[in-house]
Amino acid sequence: MVINTELCALSEYRIYPGNGKLMIRRDGRPIWLGTSKAYGLTVQRKKAAKLVWTQAWRRLHKKGISETASKKRTRRVGKVQRAVVGASLEDIKKKAAQKSEIRKDAKEAAIKELKDRKAANKAKSGGAKGKVAKPHTFQKVPKHMGGASKRAGTQR
Amino acid sequence: MIQQQTILKVSDNSGAKTVRCIRVLGGFRKKYAKLGDNIIVSVQQLRNKSKKTSKVKKGEVYKALIIRTKVPHKKKDGSQIWFGENSVVLVNKQENPVSTRIIGPLPKLLKKKKFQKFISMSSGLI
């Protein structure tokens, strides 16, 4: 539940419902006064900035500011995982959970494929330009040698 | 605490500047009137600017509604409200406002069905 409170014009303390006095000046400006102390001092035309116990004086002399500043510094923004366009939150989590090796393999495979494709493209374009390809020099493959089969070693 | 012989300010554009209370209404032997009460007044002084165009004349007797008092008005919740002046708005016999405009703010405690006409004429509530 939110309670509507006013601020005392002199001390700047909160005024809860049922407390305080509302003085309205000739010019129509309302002045809330929380206590008889505040009222008495206002009638005496005392300045809030010259009374040590008021918030105005404390603000002027920079009291209690360092605590609030240090508190602010500790506050940090936490990282939040969120779904990005085209990738849901689950997909992202799954990818992050995968082992680095698998990811590395996948990456290499992808690069290899890309290279192959590039090479193929190059060959095609090269062929179209009419570059004379070197005639294949067939190496004479020796026919089955008798000794080869007899050789001991790898058997398939 | 408005009583007989009290001089009050008139904060509307009827043309009167000050009035004197000549009777407190609302009961037998009622001595004092407070915020929101009706009284009977006689016009004492007119505003200089509106002397020719004034709706009222000096010495005329009117009813009046008290809208601001110097004496603190105690609200039901215990807090208090008071103003820097005693002022009224002139009304006719049927308790409708004589003027068309109210100068300065009205207190929120006049926000009742009875005072609806005055609220709509005013510049604001406090």
Image (tube, helix red, strand yellow):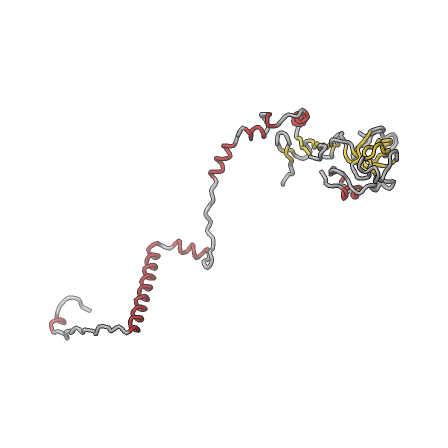
Residue B7, x across and y down, in percent: 82, 30
User: Is residue A33 among the parts visible in the rendering?
Assistant: yes
The number of discs equals: 0
Q: Is residue A78 left or right of residue A100?
A: right
As drawn, A101 above or below B117: below
Q: Is residue B2 left or right of residue A92?
A: right
Q: Is residue A61 left or right of residue B124?
A: left
The residue positioned 68% from the left and 31% from the top of the image is: A20
Outermost residue, left side:
A147
Residue B86, x across and y down, in percent: 78, 32
Outermost residue, top side:
A44
The residue positioned 64% from the left and 31% from the top of the image is: A9
Q: Quadrant of the C terminus of chain A?
A: bottom left
Q: Quadrant of the N terminus of chain A?
A: top right
Q: In front: A113, or A123?
A: A123
Residue A12, x across and y down, in percent: 61, 32
Q: In front: A149, or B16?
A: B16
Toward which corner of the image does residue B36 lie, by quadrant? top right
Q: Is residue A84 left or right of residue B9?
A: left
Outermost residue, bottom side:
A143
User: Is residue B79 among the parts visible in the rendering?
Assistant: no
As drawn, B14 above or below A81: above
Residue A106, x across and y down, in percent: 34, 59
